[in-house]
Image (tube, rainbow, N blue to C red):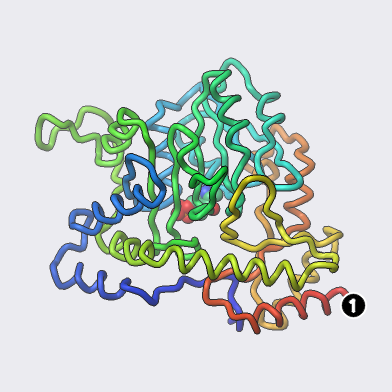
Amino acid sequence: MYKIPVYQPSLSGNEKKYVNDCLDSNWISSKGKYVSLFEKEFASYINIKYATGVCNGTVALHLALSALGIGHGDEVIVPTLTYIASVNSIVYTGATPVFVDSLSDTWQIDPQEVIKSITPRTKAIMAVHLYGHPCEMSVLQEIADEHRLFLIEDCAEAIGSQYQSQHVGIFGDIATFSFYGNKTLTTGEGGMVITNDKTIFERTIHLKGQGLAKYREYWHDIIGYNYRMTNICAAIGLAQLERIDEILLKKRKIADLYKELLQNTEFKVHPEIGDVHHSYWMVSILVSQASQRDRIRQNLAQAGIETRPVFYPVHTMPMYSHKYQRHKVAEDIGWRGINLPSFPDLTEQEIVYICDCLKNSLI
Ligand SMILES: *Cc1c(COP(=O)(O)O)cnc(C)c1O
């Protein structure tokens, strides 16, 4: 095992107390007070009208796409530099993902590439706020409006991220979050779908709960899913949300220290660019040569430090590479990027140690 893992949750608040309350009260399934409490508090934190909890971030995306009516024959534009779930969820609906490249400075979806990829079949753009840096939302909104496309935000990595002083997730028609164990806010497994649109919200609820009709018990009028969140997960989520400011502040300090210690080295820390607030889910660096990356990671591993490669661009994976195209920026970042340990309880000494090991690994 590593001395310093790349991530671990911080569960030092009311998590245990609320979970025990679920057990003591027998409310362990998806009914119970914590689900609605967590949803209400989450919506208010983001400053959005509607939020509904689901069992993970992948189904959150599937649900969001389904609620927009996306399916066979439709195309959804998505950055290739993302986690696999952004793309798979499009395929689950029967639609076709259309990959676009990212910007080399922010690592986010390139709006000019989006425009070039629009066809008569395009139905939506999926913006992914990768590693917590917001996408260029005002430009994406303009493109979506002009071409009458839906805009979906995958905020799985972006709780606490702001674009022009507003929390991400409010800029599109619908947005999703993940609360997996290594995400900034965790419920173990879990997710959330949010929107300001009442009709889209009602469709989301309808699909999430087995397509249950409103007017008759045990009567289902569409083919839905069981994507519900449990009361236990929501209990953890509520306790996490009570501490979100503290968690985000710790992560901010971690990112700042990495930046300070790595300035004037050849490691380039993923920056914060524009009128945005980067929430630094993962502090990431680029090494100068792709060929050095794996050796540097190995050196760190030998020193007890766990790291991760930045996501491989999805268009290079076997099931998506049949119409292989080049997406040069994504490929470059994908081959040169490393995620460094970024969990909230990481200490200053540990960061100093990690940066020393990084610098020594170049010698
Ligand atoms: C984690 C993640 C997801 C999927 O969330 P799960 O809860 O693991 O299903 C989707 N998109 C992105 C960008 C992610 O990082």
Residue wearing tag 1: 363
Tag 1: amino acid: Ile
Q: Residues within 10 Å of mark 1 (few under 14, many from 20)?
A: few
- The image quarter containing residue 327 is top right
The residue that appears at 57% across and 60% down in the rendered structure is: 281
Vertical order, 268 against 115 (above or below):
below
Query: 149 or 265, which is in the foreground?
Result: 265
Vertical order, 241 against 178 (above or below):
below
Vertical order, 239 against 1 (above or below):
above
- The image quarter containing residue 329 is top right
The residue that appears at 46% across and 71% down in the rendered structure is: 9
The residue that appears at 26% across and 70% down in the rendered structure is: 19
The residue that appears at 61% across and 79% down in the rendered structure is: 4
- The image quarter containing residue 274 is top right
Q: How many marks?
A: 1
Vertical order, 257 against 320 (above or below):
below
Query: 64 or 314, which is in the foreground?
Result: 64
Quadrant location, the C terminus: bottom right
In the rendered structure, the answer to whether residue 39 lies left or right of residue 278 reads left
In the rendered structure, the answer to whether residue 39 lies left or right of residue 273 reads left
Residue 310 place in picture, x, y as percent: 68, 57
Residue 193 place in picture, x, y as percent: 38, 43
Residue 126 place in picture, x, y as percent: 55, 36
**Circle 1 SS class:** loop
Quadrant location, the N terminus: bottom right
